[in-house]
Image (tube, helix red, strand yellow):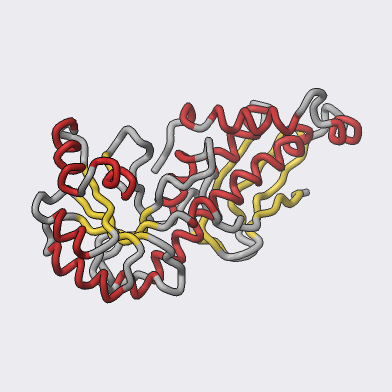
Amino acid sequence: MTLPTIMFEHVVRAALLEDLGRAGDLTTMATVPADHTGAVALVAREPGVVAGTAAAALAWQLLDPGLAVDIVLPDGSTVEPGAVIGTVSGPTRGILTGERVALNLLGHLSGVASCTASLVRETTGTRAAICCTRKTTPGLRALEKAAVVAGGGVNHRFGLDDAILIKDNHVAFAGSVTQAVARARAVAGHMVKVEVEVDTLDQLRELLTTPADAVLLDNMDPATLTEAVELVGGRMITEASGRISAGTVRAVAETGVDLISVGWVTHSAPVLDIGLDARG
């Protein structure tokens, strides 16, 4: 999943401006001559999956177009400690000034990819795909969703405008599952999918009288999920969601659901430790 630069350039620019403040990198300007050149390597400190290389590279390229950024392990690559992800060479001031923003983006997005990959491994041999949600860091949604794909997962909707997801509060205000689906179908274009969240098997049975395109089975235990999948019988895409962890994801996958959506892979993924080591 390769994002056009225009989709994340504003994020990288904002991060650089935040770091540069009102006077730029005082430390580097004071200690490194303007004509000094150098080279560094991006090195993994722990196992994981790489993501966010384009955003990291852009941080340096925006600071100094004279910098050469060579990514040798693209997004989706599995790394072990000591693996060189890429190198940066050229004017040293630019290298040092861009270091923190580049590593912040690369480490966070690689963490998202690594967490996703760990869940994908846990569900090997089942039909379930690991799916992200809209629980993303404000401003980083496109980058985080690309990182999920790099980790072997799939994307849910990107925003409120590309699908209809009828949740519990929509049902409450609409009056019933049936009424909510009828209203959604009346306004949805032919390309717009409709998904409905249900909390109980009774709600699912009501939904099955007028099936949607997908059903979100929220906070159900594996036994209930198994029964829900059997009730659906392939008439809708089934998605499990709610408090799913690395320890429970296998049991959820074995119920036969099509998707398992997990919010924490984007909003709470630990950073993958990646360092910048001077070369020569």
Which percent across, then down, holds residue 118? 46, 66
In screen coordinates, is 34 left or right of 263?
right
Question: What is the quadrant of residue 145 in the picture?
Answer: top left
In screen coordinates, is 277 left or right of 272?
right
* The residue positioned farthest toward the top in the image shown: 22
Which percent across, then down, holds residue 151? 44, 56
Viewer-nearest residue: 86 or 147: 147
Could you tell me which residue is drawn at 71 percent across and 42 percent down? 100
Q: Is residue 1 above or below residue 21?
A: below
Could you tell me which residue is drawn at 10 percent across and 49 percent down? 210
* The residue positioned farthest toward the right in the image shown: 30
In screen coordinates, is 258 left or right of 150?
left
Could you tell me which residue is drawn at 14 percent across and 60 percent down? 205
Total labels drawn = 0
Q: Is residue 236 above or below residue 247?
A: above
Viewer-nearest residue: 180 or 55: 180
Which percent across, then down, holds residue 150? 43, 52
In screen coordinates, is 130 left or right of 194?
right
Q: Quadrant of the N terminus?
A: top left
Which percent across, then down, holds residue 173? 29, 41
Q: Is residue 206 above or below residue 36?
A: below
Viewer-nearest residue: 237 or 91: 237
Could you tell me which residue is drawn at 55 percent across and 55 percent down? 268
